Amino acid sequence: MADIRSLEIFYWVAQLQSFSKAAERLNTTQPAVSQRIAALESELRVKLIDRSPRSISLTDKGRILVDYAERFLRLRSAMLNAVAEPEAMSGLVRLGVSETIVQTWLSRFMERAHAVYPNVVIDITVDVSPNMRDALVSRELDLAFLLGPVSEPNMINQRLCDYPLKFIAAHNLDVGKEPLSKRDVVKYPIITYPKTTYPYTFLREILSIPELGMPRIFTNSSLSTIVRMTQDRIGLSVIPPDVIRDELASGELRIVEAELELPNLVFTATYPMALEGGLAAPLAQLACQIANQERPEDDK
Amino acid sequence: MADIRSLEIFYWVAQLQSFSKAAERLNTTQPAVSQRIAALESELRVKLIDRSPRSISLTDKGRILVDYAERFLRLRSAMLNAVAEPEAMSGLVRLGVSETIVQTWLSRFMERAHAVYPNVVIDITVDVSPNMRDALVSRELDLAFLLGPVSEPNMINQRLCDYPLKFIAAHNLDVGKEPLSKRDVVKYPIITYPKTTYPYTFLREILSIPELGMPRIFTNSSLSTIVRMTQDRIGLSVIPPDVIRDELASGELRIVEAELELPNLVFTATYPMALEGGLAAPLAQLACQIANQERPEDDK
DNA sequence: AGAGGTTACGGGCAGCGTAAGGATC
DNA sequence: GATCCTTACGCTGCCCGTAACCTCT
């Protein structure tokens, strides 16, 4: 009676405003969801959901129950974190990751995560931060490592790491020895993150010189392509040096000093409150450790 | 996973420090309890209970889990009270009742309770208050209507009703017209509640007259027997007039005024916090209404 | 016709109760 | 031997998934 699983299912139906989406989210079938909700309603002797053919909405009692369901899920998370061994944690976490993180410490994170939580399946999606922000809000992601805090209610942001942005050039691109002025910089095409992201908008703003018109900024959603383009001397790229540590070490690429003040990229682990299983919080914690620990070269 | 039923069972095992007692309490068999606990332990990958052959004790993790289990049960109660129709409530409530209550408004309470919560089974035990206090502490009762607040931690007391104590005599017992002095009173045997109860100890205290020795106090755990003894002119009884409303109305018994200050009997509905199902709290609430509503004669 | 929810049906498995086993006093 | 928990085993009933159905756009 009053099974917690039913409440979890009801919670997701309420969140996603759809039986079928909830079924997908919970890795089950739509009839199963339908049945659980029906059972819950008959058990409580209360109608919880108004089924209009085209969309569903919660009744008053339903709205109250969502609140309780959320408290149940939170309590379960807290309980599992408090008493269960990590091996006991299981489930699927939909993790969104910014490509910058992929190029730096994601693999280390995945290793550790799998070691600590061997029974947790992590589903990774690589995308740009604005998309992931939307996906978090619409509950398509459980957790994301992305750029900047997400200032939505019910979102928890945990700071992971700061990466400075630098101008990067191929070793054989002649850019002189002195720090570049703004006018020097705009002689080259600039290669950086996609238009929807903060680095792009910032560069577009700061590099605008009225007499010269728009700077040439090439964007690419694939970091490795940006790196490749830089190696091919297409232009200067603006990325964190941390993602090209190998190329810097081998001298293939180098940092070009400039007189421009570039902001740091701040990454956060962001997740909605009250997630089922409570996997998001400990994984964010783990990511925080990984992101701030010594670099792998120090291990050897 | 992390079924609330398992937590409920674990909670009772912890409370009663016994698998078999928990099984009895939950209307199931001892192997079923054993199995649930084993499943819980393997699910959390944690040992929860130290099984010594002669007694069991909780591990550290077990102690933490009891706390969470209690919070789950409380949350479930709150949820059911908030969203469920009363008909959805079901289960067994072990109710202890003082005989005074039986003689006054218990039947009305049972009627209403059955009307509002048709699927709740109430198991009534009539006993004296000190026994019920022990039974509450040892969790053999879920709820009791008894004398005075029970000042135990984790017990909730809700005031139900005050009944004045009076000296009662048979109509044909000659006791004069004037209010009786203490010396008048002790000429008669006094018939009242059992030795373990507050009225007895109070009377024994107040009626002690050094020159005359101990007053004769007959005690009886059956109120109706006390009434019968009073009718049979064995002596004066000290009981609340409310329990003999019919006999007073018919003139068979009468109140005898005395110069003694007798305390009121204060009844409370008392139950341990964090009970499963959340039935105790609403039933106590209902009892409070019944106990304070107009008397049945006013209905007609 | 297609999206979205309900109803019908069959199979798998969890959980319960009965019964037997084992350990300690 | 008595008490108390565990293990073994068969059965019931729940829950899930497949599939057919309904309804509204």
Image (spheres, coloured by chain):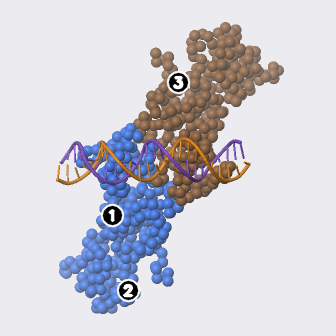
Chain colours: A brown, B blue, C purple, D orange
**Quadrant of res B236:** bottom left
Residue that appears at 69% across and 12% down: A233
Query: Which numbered disc, 2 or 1, marks the residue that appears first in the sequence?
Result: 1
Residue that appears at 33% across and 60% down: B140
- Mark 2 and mark 1: Cα distance apart in space: 31 Å
**Looking at the picture, which amino acid does disc 2 mark?**
Leu
Q: Tell me the mark number nearer the camera, choosing from 1 and 3.
A: 3
Residue that appears at 36% across and 82% down: B244
Residue occupied by mark 1: B133
**Image location (x, y in percent) of residue A257:** 66, 15
Residue occupied by mark 3: A107
Chain that bears disc 3:
A
**Looking at the picture, which amino acid does disc 3 mark?**
Ser
Mark 2 vs 1: CB contact within 8 A:
no
**Looking at the picture, which amino acid does disc 1 mark?**
Arg
| Residue in the foreground of this view, choosing between A105 and B150 | A105
